[in-house]
Amino acid sequence: MLVRKHPPKNPDQEQTIYSNLYSKIERYRFQMKGVLFDRDIDLFRETLVEGKEYDITNPIIARIPEMFKRTEQVYQMTINAATQISETQSAVELPSYLIPLTKVGDYIGKNERIDIIGIAVHMHDKAIVRAKSSGIPYEVRKVEMLDTEMQVIQLSIWNTLVTTEAEQIAQIIDTLPILEISRVTATTYNGASFNTSFASTIKINPDSPTAQLLHDWKKSHVTAIQQIKNKFIGDTGESSQQLQPCVSVQQLSEQQSGTTTAWITGKIKDITNKNSLIYNACNVCNKRCEASTGLPFTCHAFSTPHSATSEPRCVVHIDFEDESGNIPVTLFGHLAEQILCITANEIAVLSIQEQRSFVDNHIADLQDKIFKIEMTTYMLGENTQQLRWKAKRIVEAQS
Ligand SMILES: [Zn+2]
């Protein structure tokens, strides 16, 4: 079974792209790394899917060079054009290793496989940790998770999962995504510590029955979960209002860094997308989708596809101004609804002309008010490298 598929990398500037995949034969409890190079990556791109079982004939099996060895594995296989890969027809019933978050404490220090599933409520900023012995820096990102018992556990995400999955989770953390993480290690470091391992996979909003139950439970407990989430925002100081002084619009425009957040104070001068206040989005992860409103579809926004329904989502592009200048800011979802005082579903039934005149009437009310906006950056489009500012929070300031 293919446990994890890493995206192609380009480690030196010489077009030697490779892609790892871990293959595991469950019956023998044995795991092997597979590598693909150059054109072979495209050749097998569609064939190899995480979670599926394959018969792999004729790969090249060789010892892993000493310098690339990171685990106790000795051999790796290279998959190339001469390799035959076919999906096995027998559906193997995999044993479940899912442990409820309230029970993970029982596994601390034991060398047993545990998988966990929970609702991600808060993502900490990325940090660098140096290995004690070698001094090699490792990236780590911690996520706070809970399940129906409301007990919070902290999981440290390591290695390639930091740059791919953790980044995706951070982008949608406000939607309280459901995460299924395999092969979590529970150690006694600092009392108890839960970490991903080299063989871990993270599924974001997976489609399993367990995830569906959790998703339904989440919907009816949003307020309680939100309270727990707010505690983290207050405790850590990350994105806390007190620790981040307001900057002027001018200072903000000069900032290039991708992850900074800042507060600005000023007035909304205009709304620039009067004809396109809503778009269709996945009701699970909020990503833009092509499906028509109300229709069920399979969302491929993340490496693990999930079933979803297309729902209208609100977006507002504003011109924000203070004494130093003005800056375009995007407001998504409930922040846009908050500013417009109307819901995405209500906008959906208006004609273009009605939307236009609604905004024109409403903008006059907004222009006199002073707002404080907590800003962060986002990438416009998937492949463009264009950074834009979006609001994380918006509050009306006392004038
Ligand atoms: Zn989605």
Image (cartoon, rainbow, N blue to C red):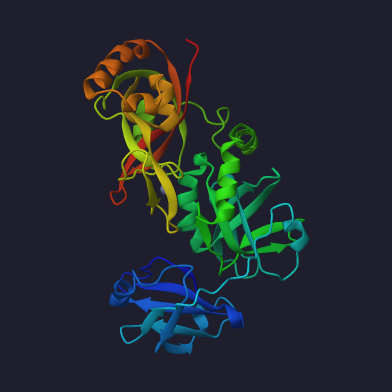
The answer to which of 155 and 326 lies nearer the viewer is: 155
* Residue at the farthest left position: 353
Q: Which image quadrant for residue 13?
A: bottom left
The answer to which of 143 and 219 lies nearer the viewer is: 219
The answer to which of 346 and 157 lies nearer the viewer is: 346
Residue at x 41%, y 87% (from the top left corner): 57
Q: Which image quadrant for residue 87?
A: bottom left
The answer to which of 36 and 27 lies nearer the viewer is: 27
Residue at x 56%, y 38% (from the top left corner): 219
Note whether 205 is above or below 16 in the view shown: above
**Rendered location of residue 115, percent (x, y):** 63, 62
Residue at x 48%, y 83% (from the top left corner): 76
**Rendered location of residue 3, percent (x, y):** 51, 70
**Rendered location of residue 391, percent (x, y):** 42, 31
Q: Is residue 368 visible?
A: yes
**Rendered location of residue 354, percent (x, y):** 25, 19
Note whether 372 is above or below 205 in the view shown: above
Note whether 346 is above or below 57 in the view shown: above
Q: Is residue 127 visible?
A: no
